[in-house]
């Protein structure tokens, strides 16, 4: 048996992992027995019979990597020994080796950690870190009253009097449960990657004024009480709020660092100048013969990596938001990533420490290729999904060959490949194509060539959508439409419409040289099956981009939306920041959708507010008949959104229907509307000012309020 790294610790900060390789695969019961034998000597912790066999390296439960699979490679947390404990650990290892035929054992440790208490991560106001429960406007998640929701004095700068306008935004909290490192992390690291607070709970609704920021602060920061997250939200509003790390702060010197590795490592040393704390990670591709349990080793080293960024002395210190490993078992690749890594360590320390981690992995299971990489939202979702097969491209040697040897040589190399699969090669070609400017004829020509070849190698890749974009940018619309129509992928079809709308939306409505009665390209691309299969988010993006770049096309696209109530809050948010006529068109489509069931849901709230805002926009545009018509339709939702009574009263006052307007004002007062005082002086209600019933109405209201007081 070969043993690597079994040595005494130098301080009490030491934490590590132990990896063993057996000559034959061990079943789950044997793995548990192995760990318990090692636990006798203090190598690791004992395992109960009903617990998973693998103590480290199992981030998620999925069928493709079941915890009870037989394994040759196994990993667990290691408790580095003192000098006096070293002999006992070696004896326990020898006994386990004799019984389970262990051929090699690796002991990897880190003996330092970040010093968060010495890191001044805010502007010096220590009280700000603890003030996470203040009664600010964003915490009033279920109220329409008070600061933050009073829009009655808002002026949107269009010259119209918006004194009656009460337009609110609705915030839709993310539904997905974020990955949790959980039991895979050694004890010192267990606090770092927790599930996002509130994720998966009922959706929270925030009412926002029309002049609220387009990107409101995230609920996660407030819910978690993360002082750094709260500081960062404040910093976002200033140009000088970025944190500058002048030097690293470690509790016992820097962690082990590596500056050279035995395998190709892309994007190094460039990563030192382009390090991004918001999204940091590395993709690796293993080589040699697959070994059962290699995933567990990757996960264990991932946990060891993040453990160095914990500081158990501080309850509020959150070094990162999310972290996980995306395993592509088909290609023996993995992506280790961490999001929002805010620690007192320089980019150089972080990069070279991660290089040390993967260099140690390469000593256990060889690595063929690697590169520093980031994870998009799709990757992050795949990390915790149970029914998918993620794809991780861990390198792009094609790009280097293209630059050094030219197009023909690079393609010849790709065709002859056996180490990289066709899907990986297609991914390489797509990456290179995306680096070319589709508006430039030369760049577009190369991009088209590579994307078409990528489609030959992987029909299911995202090359089709990118190819459509290249063709659209070159104004080859008919070819782009043909590419999109050749697939049932709704993402590609919607993307084609969005891109064409930005370049020349008339192309979507023309059918040159086509027989009479032929559907326009728009109707072919957005057929009922495509629209029904598209997600609410993608459909909303379609509407938002069309409204932004080709509002004249909205009248053609809005009727094609499926009648789904789940679309309502998304479309409602999309109605902001647009011309009134455009916003009104979207709102009128919302109120044509089936009314959501009564109850405290984001769809119901947005539906009620959409009626109100549609009435407001029609009134501001001077279309009082339409405003009154919308008002009548929205009155059944007035009890849920009393703004409706106010807006409706303005509409009928503009038509000269004082009786109906006064009835509606009475309903607003009865509903304890938040802005009763402002109705009394609202210029949009000026036609009623001389009506004695109007004066009496507010006199009675003030008298009743005085009686209550």
Image: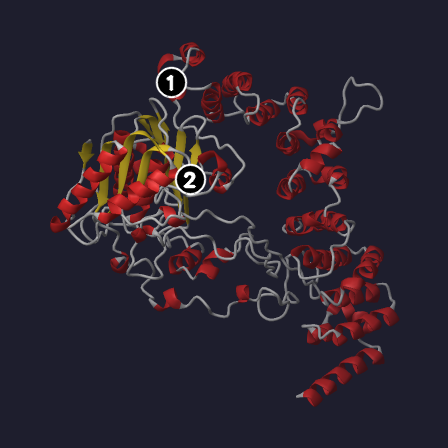
Left or right position of 660 against 413: right
In percent of width and height, residue 528 lies at 75, 34
Quadrant into which the N terminus falls: top left
Is label 1 in a helix, a strand or a loop?
helix
Left or right position of 366 against 429: left
| Number of dots carrying numbers | 2
- In this rendered view, identify the residue nearer to me: 616 or 709: 709
Identify the residue shown where x is 54% and y is 19%. 448
In percent of width and height, residue 117 lies at 27, 60
Identify the residue shown where x is 79% and y is 19%. 514
- In this rendered view, identify the residue nearer to me: 511 or 184: 184
Q: Quick one: label 2, few (<14), some, or many (20+) residues within 10 Å?
A: many
Q: Quick one: label 1, few (<14), some, or many (20+) residues within 10 Å?
A: few
Closer to the camera: disc 2 or disc 1? 2
Which residue bears the numbered disc 2? 67
Which of the 4 quarters of the picture holds residue 490? top right
Is label 2 in a helix, a strand or a loop?
loop
Identify the residue shown where x is 47% and y is 34%. 64
In percent of width and height, residue 144 lies at 64, 67
Left or right position of 328 against 527: left
Which of the 4 quarters of the picture holds residue 507? top right
- In this rendered view, identify the residue nearer to me: 278 or 353: 353
Quadrant into which the C terminus falls: bottom right
| N-term-proximal mark, 2 vs 1 | 2
Which of the 4 quarters of the picture holds residue 526? top right
Q: Residue 403 carries which label?
A: 1
Identify the residue shown where x is 23% and y is 32%. 104
- In this rendered view, identify the residue nearer to me: 242 or 594: 594
Q: Is residue 629 placed above or below 668 in the rendered structure?
A: above
Q: Which mark is residue 155?
A: none
In percent of width and height, residue 615 lies at 76, 58
Q: Is residue 234 placed above or below 497 in the rendered structure?
A: below
């Amino acid at each position: 048996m070969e043993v690597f790294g079994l040595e005494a610790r130098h301080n009490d900060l030491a934490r590590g992992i132990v990896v063993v390789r057996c000559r034959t695969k061990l079943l789950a019961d044997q793995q548990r027995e192995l760990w318990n034998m090692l636990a006798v000597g203090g190598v690791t912790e004992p395992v109960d019979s009903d617990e998973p066999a693998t103590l480290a390296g199992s981030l998620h439960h999925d069928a493709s990597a079941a915890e009870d699979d037989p394994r040759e490679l196994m990993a667990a947390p290691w408790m580095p020994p003192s000098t006096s404990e070293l002999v006992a650990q070696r004896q326990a290892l020898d006994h386990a080796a004799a019984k389970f035929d262990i051929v090699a054992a690796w002991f990897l440790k880190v003996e330092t950690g970040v010093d968060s208490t010495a890191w001044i991560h805010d502007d010096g106001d220590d009280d700000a870190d603890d003030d996470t429960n203040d009664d600010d406007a964003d915490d009033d998640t279920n109220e329409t009253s008070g600061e933050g929701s009073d829009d009655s004095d808002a002026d949107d700068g269009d010259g119209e009097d918006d004194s009656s306008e009460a337009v609110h935004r609705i915030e839709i909290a993310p539904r997905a449960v974020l990955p949790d490192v959980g039991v895979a992390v050694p004890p010192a690291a267990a606090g770092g990657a927790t599930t996002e607070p509130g994720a998966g709970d009922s959706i929270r609704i925030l009412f926002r004024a029309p002049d609220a920021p387009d990107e409101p602060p995230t609920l996660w920061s407030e819910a978690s009480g993360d002082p750094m997250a709260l500081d960062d939200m404040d910093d976002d509003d200033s140009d000088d709020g970025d944190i500058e790390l002048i030097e690293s702060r470690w509790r016992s010197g820097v962690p082990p660092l590596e500056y050279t590795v035995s395998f190709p490592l892309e994007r190094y040393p460039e990563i030192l100048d382009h390090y991004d704390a918001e999204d940091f990670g590395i993709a690796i591709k293993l080589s040699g013969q697959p070994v059962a349990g290699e995933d567990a080793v990757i996960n264990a080293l991932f946990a060891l990596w993040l453990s160095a960024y914990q500081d158990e002395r501080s309850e509020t210190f959150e070094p990162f938001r999310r972290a996980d490993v995306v395993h592509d078992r088909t290609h023996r690749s993995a992506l280790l990533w961490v999001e929002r890594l805010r620690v007192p360590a320089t980019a150089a320390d972080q990069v070279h420490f991660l290089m040390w981690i993967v260099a140690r992995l390469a000593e256990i299971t060889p690595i063929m290729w690697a590169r520093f990489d980031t994870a998009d939202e799709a990757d992050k979702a795949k990390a915790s999904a149970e029914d998918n097969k993620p794809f991780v491209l861990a390198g792009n040697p094609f790009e280097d060959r293209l630059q050094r040897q030219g197009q023909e040589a690079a393609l010849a190399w790709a065709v002859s490949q056996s180490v990289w699969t066709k899907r990986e090669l297609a991914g390489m070609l797509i990456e290179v194509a995306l680096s070319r400017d589709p508006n430039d004829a030369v760049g577009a020509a190369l991009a088209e060539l590579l994307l078409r070849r990528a489609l030959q190698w992987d029909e299911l890749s995202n090359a089709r959508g990118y190819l459509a974009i290249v063709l659209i940018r070159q104004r080859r619309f008919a070819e782009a439409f043909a590419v999109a129509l050749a697939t049932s992928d709704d993402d590609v079809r919607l993307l084609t419409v969005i891109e064409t709308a930005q370049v020349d939306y008339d192309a979507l409505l023309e059918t040159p040289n086509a027989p009479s009665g032929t559907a326009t390209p728009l109707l072919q691309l957005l057929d009922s099956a495509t629209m029904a299969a598209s997600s609410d988010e993608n459909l909303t993006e379609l509407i938002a981009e069309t409204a932004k770049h080709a509002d004249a096309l909205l009248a053609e696209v809005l009727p094609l939306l499926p009648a789904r109530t789940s679309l309502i809050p998304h479309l409602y948010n999309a109605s902001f920041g647009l011309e009134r006529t455009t916003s009104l068109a979207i709102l009128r489509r919302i109120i044509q959708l089936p009314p959501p069931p009564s109850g405290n849901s984001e769809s119901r709230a947005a539906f009620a507010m959409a009626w109100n805002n549609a009435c407001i926009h029609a009134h501001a545009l001077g279309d009082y008949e339409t405003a009154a018509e919308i008002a009548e339709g929205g009155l059944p939702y007035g009890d849920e959104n009393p703004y409706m009574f106010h807006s409706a009263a303005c509409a009928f006052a503009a038509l000269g229907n004082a009786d109906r307007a006064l009835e509606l004002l009475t309903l607003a007062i009865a509903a304890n509307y938040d802005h009763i005082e402002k109705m009394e002086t609202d210029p949009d209600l000026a036609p009623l000012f001389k009506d004695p019933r109007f004066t009496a109405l507010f006199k009675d209201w003030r008298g009743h309020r005085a009686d209550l007081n």
